[in-house]
Amino acid sequence: MTQRMLGCHLAQTRSGQPSISAMRGFMARQAPAWLDRSHIDPAPLLLGNDVLGDCTSAGIGNHLRATAALAGFQIAVTTSAAVQFYSRSTGYVPGNPATDNGGVEVDVLTTALRDGYTLADQTLFPLWGSADPGDLNGIRNITAGLSAAYLGVQLATADMWEDQDGNLPPVWDTDSPADHGDPTPGSAGGHCLLLWDYAGTADTDLVTLLTWGSKQKATWRWVRSRIMEAHGLAWGQLHAPGGLYPAGDDWAALVEANAAYLRGVS
């Protein structure tokens, strides 16, 4: 039976943090009406999020794996690498439970931008930008063009309900049965996960989320009710994951937005 930990603090902002809106053409276009990736395995891993509140680090590690899968290869991300980055980005001291306090997504992403995400054989540096969490078209553009959207959500106790075999509800929705617990967003806590694909854009159309080493289905209305922040990550060291990947002026604008931010925080 899989234990599931949370670990994402309430959404915060930092002065000068990069915005994905810097890529004006990328974010202004109409996102695909559906995004079917059922034939591609992003191979998400737990990366310690069954025993630690390192979902912010696990989310970056699984974003790397999702991006690689779209390009036709895979990257080895180990639990030790994810925990090492969790420690660097949040102050967690391995072996000291009192320091296992989760992370702030923008601070975790800042650490990744500045110091990289170190694996056994390479260190990878993302560019990133924040999006308006209410802009679902923009979030779909991030998902389609940048392999997955990196989200912070407020989970309800009802979302964490498990059947006798330890399985979560097959679909997260806003109309959970009364015996599943408190449906109030945030009653369980904050969590970082990835939006991978979607079957349409209507409220009841299903999306696929990557979390706790598996794929979890949810409705768009659930996403809208739970989301507190959204970010796009781009890995320039990896192959571009398709024709929707930003290029030209959009890419240059994202590079400059990240460089300007780094100048302010270094």
Image (cartoon, helix red, strand yellow):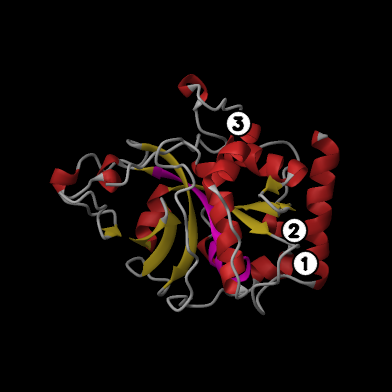
Q: Is residue 33 visible?
A: yes
First-in-chain label (3 vs 2)? 2
Label count reads 3
**Is 192 left, or right, of 187 in this rendering?**
right
Residue 150 is left or right of residue 222, and the answer is right
State yes or no: discs 1 and 2 in contact (Cβ < 8 Å).
yes
- What percent of the width, then of the height, locates residue 219? 35, 62
Image: magenta residue range? 139-154
Say which residue label 2 marks: 22
Looking at the rendered structure, the secondary structure element under dot 1 is: helix
Relative depth, front residue between 248 and 21: 248
Image spot of residue 135 (x, y percent): 54, 59
Q: Which residue is mark 3?
A: 90
User: Mark 3, mark 2: which one is toward the viewer?
Assistant: 3
Measure the C-alpha gap from mark 3 to mark 1: 31 Å
- Residue at the spot 28% in from the left edge and 40% down from the top edge: 157
Reading the image, the residue beneath label 1 is 250
